Image (cartoon, helix red, strand yellow):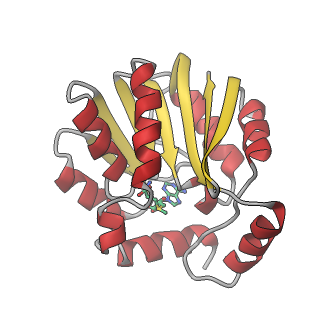
């Protein structure tokens, strides 16, 4: 199995565990949700949306916002749909998204890019589906270089489809390469960061 098949199988099996039901990183989501609210986002898609934990939090903050989600795992998609019947949740691959160009105000991606074997393809797709001046927001795992190196080695032994974690500088460079501008990042905790840019 490649990492994408492992991710799909793992998240199909574990879609209803308690940690997934409540979202992995709800502290981070409070902060990323505020960033998007401050930018006046009214039409948001969350990529690798899992069971919809972040979308549910954003919906509480702004019940009028139009919400969409995309996830590779059928079971995660089903859970998101049950949780947020008003949202448009689609099963699909971030590296090849089934959406038209320029249709979203903002694209977020929480704790999913480290599962993507070709993150540069996912970021190019995020750029494509965003309207001009739209916001991209990436929330990810990180750590000192030795820890990232260890994690990236460990991922090769692990059945969860995790592929690689990146430093903030690496993620900023990937966003730039994908065509984004005005890129900023900051740590949220010692092991997680948010990186934001504009199309
Ligand atoms: C660690 S979970 C995070 C879920 C959710 N964003 C959260 O923070 O609770 C990673 C999610 O990314 C999804 N995923 C992994 N690879 C993907 C891909 N290529 N395209 C879309 N979703 C993907 C998985 O199915 C899983 O739901």
Q: Is residue 67 rendered to the left or right of residue 160?
A: left
| Residue 181 seen | no
Residue 143 vertical position relative to residue 187 in the rendered view, above or below: below
Residue 46 vertical position relative to residue 18 in the rendered view, above or below: above
Residue 168 vertical position relative to residue 26 in the rendered view, above or below: above
Q: Which residue is drawn at 33% across and 62% down?
A: 76
| Residue 158 seen | yes
Q: Which of 193 and 120 is in front in this view?
A: 193
Q: Which residue is drawn at 70% across and 63% down?
A: 164
Residue 137 picture location, percent across and down: 55, 36
Q: Which of the 4 quarters of the picture holds residue 20?
A: bottom left
Q: Nearer the viewer, residue 20 or 104?
A: 20
Residue 198 vertical position relative to residue 123 in the rendered view, above or below: above
Residue 47 picture location, percent across and down: 46, 46
Which residue ends up furthest to the top in the rendered image? Answer: 132
From the image, which quarter does the N terminus lie in?
bottom right
Residue 184 picture location, percent across and down: 68, 30
Q: Which of the 4 quarters of the picture holds residue 171?
A: top right
Which residue ends up furthest to the front in the rendered image? Answer: 190
Q: Is residue 8 rendered to the left or right of residue 191?
A: left
Q: Which residue is drawn at 55% across and 76% down?
A: 160
Q: Which of 169 and 176 is in front in this view?
A: 169
From the image, which quarter does the C terminus lie in?
top right
How many discs appear?
0
Residue 188 picture location, percent across and down: 57, 46
Q: Which residue is drawn at 40% across and 36% down?
A: 33
């Amino acid at each position: 199995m490649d990492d994408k098949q492992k991710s799909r199988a793992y998240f199909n099996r574990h879609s209803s565990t308690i940690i997934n039901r409540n979202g992995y990183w709800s502290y981070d989501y409070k902060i990323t949700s505020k960033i998007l609210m401050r930018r006046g986002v009214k039409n948001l898609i969350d990529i690798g949306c899992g069971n919809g934990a972040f979308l549910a939090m954003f919906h509480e903050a702004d019940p009028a916002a139009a919400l969409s989600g995309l996830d590779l795992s059928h079971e995660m998609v089903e859970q998101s749909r049950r949780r947020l019947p008003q949202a448009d949740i689609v099963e699909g691959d971030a590296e090849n998204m089934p959406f038209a160009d320029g249709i979203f105000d903002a694209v977020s991606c929480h704790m999913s890019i480290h599962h993507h074997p070709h993150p540069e393809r996912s970021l190019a797709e995020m750029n494509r589906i965003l309207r001009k001046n739209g916001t991209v927001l990436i929330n990810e795992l990180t750590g000192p270089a030795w820890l990232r190196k260890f994690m990236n080695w460990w991922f090769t032994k692990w059945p969860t489809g995790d592929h690689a974690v990146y430093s903030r500088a690496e993620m900023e460079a990937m966003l730039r390469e994908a065509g984004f501008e005005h890129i900023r990042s900051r740590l949220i905790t010692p092991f997680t960061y948010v990186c934001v840019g504009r199309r």
